[in-house]
Amino acid sequence: MKNVLSLLFVFLFVGCYGTIQVKNDNFNNSIKTEMSMLMWADPILMGSNEITFTKEYKNKNVSPTVLHMKITTAPEFGNISQNVSIKVGTKIYPMKLGEMGGQIDTTISQDAMTGKLSADSDKTFNVVLTLNNEVEKAIMISENIMIRISLGSKDATFAFTGSDVNKLKEFISFDPNKRK
């Protein structure tokens, strides 16, 4: 029974990822769209990392796609560099991160039998990356996209392929004013 509940939770939790959500913002008199994806990067990152894509539609103006990335890594890796590369197809676009913030999370546990304490830490970074029009257009005709972020002397690469690319293309081309 416990396994069935765990499996059900995973399906419900993951099911909201990759779905475009539309929100009316009466304060700004605009419409905002959002889509989240869980991404895994090559070895130096821990587990899944969440990327949320957002856009804002106001009157006939559309903001560029903004990526809000939550990245978790081991504490021994350096801080995130502001320089980022996006590879779309065979072309590399050098870019800069916008807002950046981070924290170190430490979990302390005690062994019930021995009373011995142990600690485990990880770093969580929250970063923002705005895609320019040239990158968005390139994504629409590409089949693979990679984002490379530097953590000290190490690089982490997020690869979008197959359905991830299709979801990103759908998000970039989505028009909330034409939805059913």
Image (tube, rainbow, N blue to C red):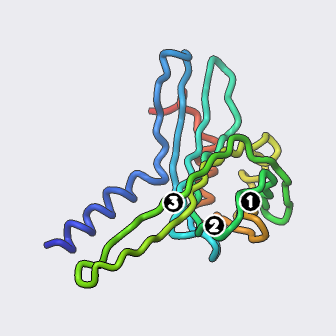
Residue at x 47%, y 34% (from the top left corner): 22
The tag earlier along the polypeptide, 3 or 1, is 3
Tag 1's secondary structure?
Answer: loop
Tag 2's secondary structure?
Answer: strand
Task: Tell whether 91 sits left or right of 74.
Answer: right
- Which amino acid does the dot numbered 2 rest on? Thr
The relative height of residue 11 versus residue 21 in the rendered view (above or below) is: below
Gap in angstroms between the C-alphas marked 3 and 1: 20 Å
Is disc 3 in contact with disc 1, using a CB cutoff of under 8 Å? no
Percent x, y of residue 8: 25, 64
Tag 3's secondary structure?
Answer: strand
Gap in angstroms between the C-alphas marked 2 and 3: 13 Å
Residue at x 74%, y 59% (from the top left corner): 142
* Number of callouts: 3
Gap in angstroms between the C-alphas marked 2 and 1: 10 Å
Is disc 2 in contact with disc 3, using a CB cutoff of under 8 Å? no
Mark in front: 2 vs 3: 3
Task: Tell whether 75 sits left or right of 129.
Answer: left
Percent x, y of residue 130: 72, 42
- Which amino acid does the dot numbered 3 rest on? Leu
What number is the disc on residue 38? 3
Looking at this view, name the residue that lies furthest to the left: 1
- Which amino acid does the dot numbered 1 rest on? Ser
The relative height of residue 60 versus residue 124 in the rendered view (above or below) is: above
Percent x, y of residue 77: 67, 68
Percent x, y of residue 55: 61, 35
Find disc 2 in the rendering and name its residue.
161
Find disc 1 in the rendering and name its residue.
142
Mark in front: 2 vs 1: 2
The relative height of residue 100 versus residue 49 in the rendered view (above or below) is: above
Q: Residues within 10 Å of mark 3 (few under 14, many from 20)?
A: some
Q: Residues within 10 Å of mark 2 (few under 14, many from 20)?
A: some
